[in-house]
């Protein structure tokens, strides 16, 4: 007699237990996850939204989006492009006339496209608080106006919060409302993203997941005393929060060619395709493929993946989309130690549902003249020092400015060679800039290369200029 073996629950059916097990294994405060698969949304949450107050995380808890917000800002701008209000290749100063850098050529050179794909050449971030009134983005633009170019416009991919600040100001001018209101009224509500909030006091109206830091004295998690970054960076990700479900609803619109979950059209198919089409190539030769218009593009063993990461002073966010398989997953963690949890959950989700996952450690190969690549590299906020060590490099990282995102300890890592000017880090070193990093099987790429008349260290999205 044939007896059928019991069916194995799918990864979506096991989402709750996978999340709880991962939080316990990696000793994290809390997290929320959502998966979009075959049009269905699966979600789970576990741990603490606020450990000190003993508030548990639920699927309705709002977590920080961090820089995943940049894809929301890019989508608002794409809506205006669809409506004919914005020309993608026009100077952004046409729409933000107060952007008036000292060099008139820069004012004419920096386009909307450059801001969307991180090739503007503007200084990446200006960590100066411009208050929380409705002129905060305008004041950020005024700060940018006086800063010198980081590199010539269009010369290379260099992750740029400042470009997103300009795009946020563009939406304010054209939609005639503050960015924080535009995001909710013109994007979140039409897409059914009802958990999205953009101001701190809005987050406090419901169940809010505060970011957590490790208490150096006790080793326990404690709430970050400054959980919200400067509002002047809100369109780049400093304040918006929401549910993991909200992010996969957003992803679903992009998967469905611009159609919202209720069947209404939000974006045209052509602009959705343009957003997901590579416009700039990353200098690293694996994992990070480059950027479209707002979207980060990843190469998972030859498969194109769309997404973005986010981080605040004490949170992490991950969003990944497999457009062809119509699968999306969002993970929100209320501490900076969430990379191993991302590995556990997303590897299970994308391996089972899409037969693909991030590439593992590549074969080593000579990287070239290590002595010529040795030296110090910086973006003004952090400094990397590279020194030859065997076949690879010893890399040390230290903060140069007292700002919320660079308050890390001095850290060292081993760069393994994988070809001319190409390196990778693995194990705990993959958690770059995180105190007490945990082991992981993930690898993260680096490259040293020449561009715009100087040498650069590149981490897949961010570029650091040789000092």
Image (spheres, grey):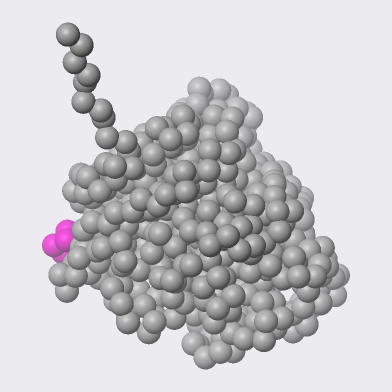
Horizontal relation, residue 228 to residue 283: left or right = left
Q: What secondary structure is the magenta-colored segment mainly?
A: loop
* Residue 400 in picture, x, y percent from top left: 48, 64
State the residue at coordinates (53%, 54%).
252
Vertical position of residue 288 compared to residue 30: above or below: above
* Residue 308 in picture, x, y percent from top left: 52, 53
Q: Quadrant of the C terminus?
A: bottom right
Horizontal relation, residue 195 to residue 251: left or right = left
Q: Quadrant of residue 164?
A: bottom right
Task: Inspect this view and state whether residue 339 appears.
Answer: no
Vertical position of residue 79 compared to residue 170: above or below: above
State the residue at coordinates (31%, 67%).
61
Q: Which residues are magenta?
A: 215-220
Vertical position of residue 316 compared to residue 49: above or below: above
Q: Of 238 and 125, which appears nearest the observer? A: 238
Q: Of 40 and 2, which appears nearest the observer? A: 2
Task: Inspect this view and state whether residue 44 appears.
Answer: yes
Q: Of 185 and 126, which appears nearest the observer? A: 185
State the residue at coordinates (25%, 28%).
7
State the residue at coordinates (21%, 25%).
6
Horizontal relation, residue 376 to residue 226: left or right = right
Q: Quadrant of the N terminus?
A: top left
* Residue 64 in picture, x, y percent from top left: 40, 67
Q: Quadrant of residue 98?
A: bottom right
Horizontal relation, residue 178 to residue 88: left or right = left
How many discs appear?
A: 0
* Residue 419 in picture, x, y percent from top left: 60, 27
Q: Of 313 and 385, which appears nearest the observer? A: 313
């Amino acid at each position: 007699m044939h007896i059928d073996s019991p069916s194995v629950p799918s990864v979506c059916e096991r989402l709750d237990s996978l999340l709880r097990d991962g939080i316990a294994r990696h000793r994290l405060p809390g997290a929320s996850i959502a998966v979009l698969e075959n049009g269905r949304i699966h979600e789970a949450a576990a741990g603490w939204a606020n450990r000190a107050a003993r508030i548990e995380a639920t699927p309705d808890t709002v977590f920080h989006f961090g820089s995943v917000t940049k894809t929301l800002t890019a989508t608002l701008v794409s809506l205006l492009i669809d409506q004919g209000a914005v020309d993608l290749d026009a100077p952004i100063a046409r729409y933000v006339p107060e952007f008036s850098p000292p060099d008139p050529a820069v004012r004419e050179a920096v386009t909307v496209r450059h801001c969307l794909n991180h090739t503007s050449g503007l200084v990446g971030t200006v960590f100066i608080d411009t208050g929380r009134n409705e002129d905060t983005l305008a004041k950020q633009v005024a700060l940018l106006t006086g800063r010198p170019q980081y590199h010539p416009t269009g010369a290379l991919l260099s992750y740029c919060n400042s470009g997103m600040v300009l795009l946020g100001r563009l939406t304010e001018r054209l939609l005639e409302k503050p960015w924080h209101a535009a995001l909710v009224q013109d994007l979140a509500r039409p897409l059914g993203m009802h958990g999205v909030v953009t101001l701190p006091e809005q987050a406090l109206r419901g169940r809010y997941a505060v970011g957590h830091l490790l208490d150096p004295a006790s080793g326990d998690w404690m709430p970050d005393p400054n959980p919200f970054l400067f509002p002047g960076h809100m369109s780049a990700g400093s304040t918006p929060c929401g549910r993991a479900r909200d992010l996969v609803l957003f992803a679903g619109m992009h998967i469905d060619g611009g159609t919202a979950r209720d069947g209404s059209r939000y974006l045209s198919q052509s602009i959705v395709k343009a957003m997901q089409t590579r416009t700039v190539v990353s200098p690293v030769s694996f994992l990070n493929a480059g950027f479209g218009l707002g979207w980060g593009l990843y190469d998972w063993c030859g498969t194109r993946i769309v997404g973005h990461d986010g981080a605040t002073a004490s949170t992490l966010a991950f969003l990944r989309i497999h457009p062809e398989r119509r699968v999306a997953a969002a993970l929100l963690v209320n501490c900076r130690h969430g990379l191993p949890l991302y590995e556990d959950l997303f590897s299970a989700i994308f391996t089972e549902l899409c037969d693909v996952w991030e590439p593992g450690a590549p074969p080593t190969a000579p990287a070239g003249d290590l002595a010529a690549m040795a030296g110090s590299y910086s973006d003004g906020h952090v400094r990397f020092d590279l020194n030859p060590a065997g076949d690879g490099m010893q890399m040390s990282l230290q903060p140069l400015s007292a700002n919320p995102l660079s308050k890390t300890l001095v850290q060292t890592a081993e760069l393994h060679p994988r070809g001319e000017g190409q390196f990778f880090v693995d194990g705990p070193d993959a958690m770059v800039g995180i105190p007490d990093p945990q082991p992981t099987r993930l690898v993260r790429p680096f490259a040293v290369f020449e561009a715009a008349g100087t040498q650069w260290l590149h981490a897949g999205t961010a570029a650091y200029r040789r000092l």
